[in-house]
Every structure is written in structure tokens, then in C-alpha cells.
Image (cartoon, rainbow, N blue to C red):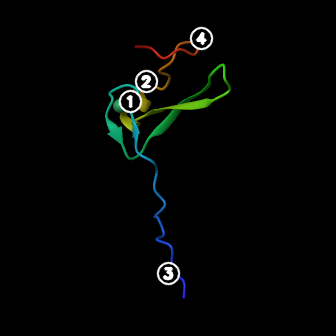
Amino acid sequence: MTPDKASEPERPTRRMCVHCKQTTDTPVLVHEGETVSGTTWNVYSCPDCAATRPLPVSEDGNARP
Ligand SMILES: [Zn+2]
């Protein structure tokens, strides 16, 4: 008899908001980028910041400080 694998509930991964640096359970993807090495990376924001500042990066793709 094989024990049932602990089923993990569907829930979003916790992410840190790029704007306010607060960890949120409901991250909003605001930008997708790719490094020169081909690695993709995502920028997440909390819902509050995403509503007011939807695009945290400049046109050249660099995150603002
Ligand atoms: Zn935020």
C-alpha cells in the first residue's frame, strides 16, 4: 500500500512586490524579461501597486532602483 502523496493546494507562490517590497500571496505579473544568457525572469507586484504602477521597468528593460 502506497501512502498518498501530500496534495498541495492550488495557491499562488508568494512573491515580493517590486514596488513596495512587501511579500504578497496574490502577486501580479507586471513584466517578463530575459537575460542575455536566455534566462527568463518575471517581475511581480502586489495588487495595490499593480493598479497604480503597472509598469515598474523602463523601456530598456532595466528595473528602476
Ligand atoms: Zn506593492
Q: Which residue is mark 3?
A: 3
| Percent x, y of residue 43 | 50, 30
Label placed on residue 23: none
Rendering quadrant holding ligand 1: top left
| Amino acid type of the residue that numbered disc 1 sits on in the rendered structure | Cys
Mark nearer the viewer, 4 or 2 = 4
Q: CA distance from mark 4 to mark 2?
A: 17 Å
Q: Which residue is mark 1?
A: 49
The residue that appears at 39% across and 32% down in the rendered structure is 17
Q: Earlier in the sequence, mark 4 or mark 3?
A: 3
**Residue 48 appears left or right of 7:** left
**Residue 54 appears left or right of 48:** right
Q: Earlier in the sequence, mark 1 or mark 3?
A: 3
SS for tag 3?
loop
| Amino acid type of the residue that numbered disc 4 sits on in the rendered structure | Asp
Seen in the picture, residue 37 relative to 58 is either above or below; the reply is: below
Q: Which residue is mark 2?
A: 53
Q: For the N terminus, give its image quadrant.
A: bottom right
Q: Earlier in the sequence, mark 2 or mark 3?
A: 3
Q: For the C terminus, give its image quadrant.
A: top left
Q: Earlier in the sequence, mark 4 or mark 2?
A: 2
